[in-house]
Image (cartoon, grey):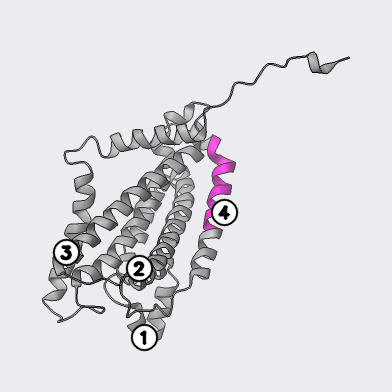
Amino acid sequence: MDTSAISFPKRKRNLPMLRVVTALMLREMSTTYGRSPGGYFWAIAEPVAAIALLSLAFSLFIRNPPLGQSFVLFYATGFLPLSAYQTLATNVGSAIRFSRPLLAYPRVTYVDAIIARVLLALITQIIIFAVVIAGSLLLDSNQLNFDFIAFLRMWGMVVACGVSVGLVNCFLGSRFPAWQYIWAVLNRPMFLVSGVLYLVDGLPEFGRDIALMIPPTHFIMMSRVAFFDIYDGPYISEVYVYGVTLLLGALGMLLLHRYHREILSEPG
């Protein structure tokens, strides 16, 4: 029998992931930034206000920041990476809850929702970072010896940490609603421990060892390597950061893959 003459019906192609992710991103942009007056303005105003207050408060007590001459630039290079990490972790952690109505459609998966939230949060945080750093340079008239490679390495660690922690929190927060409050309490000391306000290098050995156990400490140090040519970040360990985030990310994805149907079937 000549099978070449037989025509098989073409399968109806699924909606490409790119279109699904783009639609989810546009939905979140309108939901997150389109319903409040000012939209993106407030996303930028919040870190600007925090950095300004830190700079003003510490400039009243010490003559110079731990690095360079600009209080604004020093605290910006600590606060902004930590804020980006926390935003990524929060957005990924709430991806299923946020997109639950759309996940009822067979062409929209929880992976699409996570990717959309990661991309939108990342783009937003990069814009905020650029605007705040440019403003600090203009304000203090600083000459910047910018290390672009270190900057990319910093963002690599920020994204890895934010996504991996967010994946674990996405599972825990979906199965155990009280987890989001527990995590908020556990996460509060991060601002003080991770080196936003000081250089970890100057801590006593015991305190430094504790700080270095926290992955965000490493990308905050890398951020300062990118913007201060006099700082080489001797205690940065990208291997440690990516090792921890690989374990967390794999655990989070395995749990979501195993239980996402049960999570979606639970009452919202």
Q: Are the residues tagged 2 and 4 within 8 Å (C-beta)?
A: no
Give the spatial CA distance, label 2 vs label 4.
26 Å
Would you say the magenta stretch is mainly helix, strand or loop? helix
The amino acid sitting under disc 2 is: Ser
User: Which residue lies under the disc numbered 3?
Assistant: 138
Give the spatial CA distance, label 1 vs label 4.
34 Å
Residue 139 point in image, percent of width and height: 14, 65
User: Which residue lies under the disc numbered 1?
Assistant: 204
Q: Give me the residue at 31% from left, 48% from top.
A: 124
In the image, which residues are magenta? 247-261
Classify mark 4: helix, strand or loop.
Answer: helix
Residue 33 point in image, percent of width and height: 26, 39
Nearer the observer, 258 or 110: 110
Between discs 3 and 4, the one toward the N terminus: 3
Which of the numbered marks, if any, corresponds to residue 223?
2
Give the spatial CA distance, label 1 vs label 3.
35 Å
Q: Which quadrant: the N terminus?
A: top right
Give the spatial CA distance, label 2 vs label 1.
22 Å
Nearer the observer, 74 or 104: 74
